[in-house]
Amino acid sequence: MSDKRILLIIGGGIAAYKSLLLIRELQKRGIGTRCILTNAGAEFVTPLSVSALSGDRVYSQLFNLTDEAEMGHIELSRSADLVVVAPATADLMAKAAQGLANDLASTTLLATDKPVLMAPAMNVRMWQHKATQRNLATLRGDGIHFIGPDEGEMACGEFGPGRMAEPLAIAEAVAGLLHVGAPGRPAYPGDCRPDPGTDRPCPLSFQSFLRPAGLCHRQRLRSARRQRHAGVWPDGIAGSRRHARHSRGNRL
C-alpha cells in the first residue's frame, strides 16, 4: 500500500460521475483521496456518494467557520501530494489561469504548493474557443499537467475533443506523477524502469504514462551501447542486423 494522497477537485459537468470511478481506481493503487466538490459539481454527484467512496469528509464551502478557523483552504492545499482537477471545466481553468479565488476550489488552486493535474471536460466549441486555448497555454506555462481531453461523442450530441479522459487513464497518470505502480506493475512514470545502476526513472513525456510496461526507447539505446562496448550484442539488435544482412544478400 502507498501512503500517497491526492486532493481531488470535482468541477461541475456531466463528466463529474467519472470522478467517482476515479476514486475507486486510485484506491486500487493504494492512493488516498480527499475531495473538494464545487457547487456546480454537486448538481451532478452528491456529497454522500463522494464521501462514501473516498472514506473522508467532503469539502465545498470557502466560508465555513469550523474549517476556516484552522485556515482550511491552506491546509487542504498542502495536505496532499498532488492536486487533481477532474473534471476541469472551462470555468475552473479560466479562474486558475487568471489567479481568481472566489470559492474553495479556486482558492485552493491558488494556495497550493503541490503539482497540479487537470483533466479538461467541456463542449467541443468551448474547448476550441480562443479564450480556453489561451488559458490552456497559460496554465501549461505555469507548469500545470494535463491529460486529455479525449475525442468522441458528447452528452450534448456533438462530436470532437472535449470528453474527459477515462478514469483508468487519469489514475495511471496520477500514479506516474506520484511514482506509485499499479498492482503487478513497476512504480515509475510510464512503467519505465530505472536506468541500470541508478535509481532514477528515465524522463518521459506525459503521454508515455499510457505506454505498456518495459524499457523506454532511450533506455534501450543506453543498454545496447553498454553491451556493445562490452562486446555483447543484445539478441533483439543482433537479430535485426543479421536479418537485415540476410535480406540484402537475397536482393543481390
Image: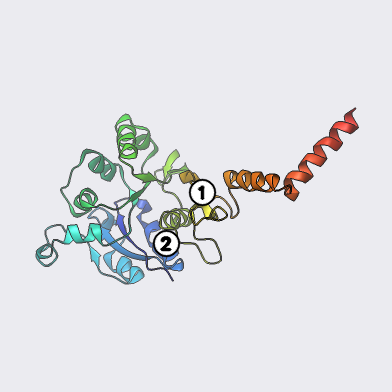
> Are the residues tagged 1 and 2 within 8 Å (C-beta)?
no
Mark 1, residue position:
202
Q: Position of residue 120 (x, y in %)?
A: 37, 45
CA distance separating discs 1 and 2: 30 Å
Comparing labels 1 and 2, the label whose residue is closer to the camera: 1
In this view of the protein, can residue 159 be seen by the observer?
Answer: no
Mark 2, residue position:
21
Label 2: few (<14), some (14–19) or many (≥20) C-alpha neighbours in 10 Å? some
Q: Is residue 245 above or below residue 213?
A: above
- The residue type indicated by label 2 comes to Leu
- Asked which quadrant contains residue 251, the reply is top right
Label 1: few (<14), some (14–19) or many (≥20) C-alpha neighbours in 10 Å? some
Residue at the spot 19% in from the left edge and 54% down from the top edge: 104
Element type at mark 1: loop
In this rendering, would 139 be left or right of 197? left
Residue at the spot 82% in from the left edge and 41% down from the top edge: 242
Tag 2 or tag 1, which sits nearer the N-term? 2
Q: Position of residue 191 (x, y in %)?
A: 53, 55
In this rendering, would 136 be left or right of 38? right
Quadrant of the image containing the C terminus:
top right
In this rendering, would 233 be left or right of 8? right
Q: Position of residue 13 (x, y in %)?
A: 32, 50
- The residue type indicated by label 1 comes to Cys
Furthest-top residue in this view? 252
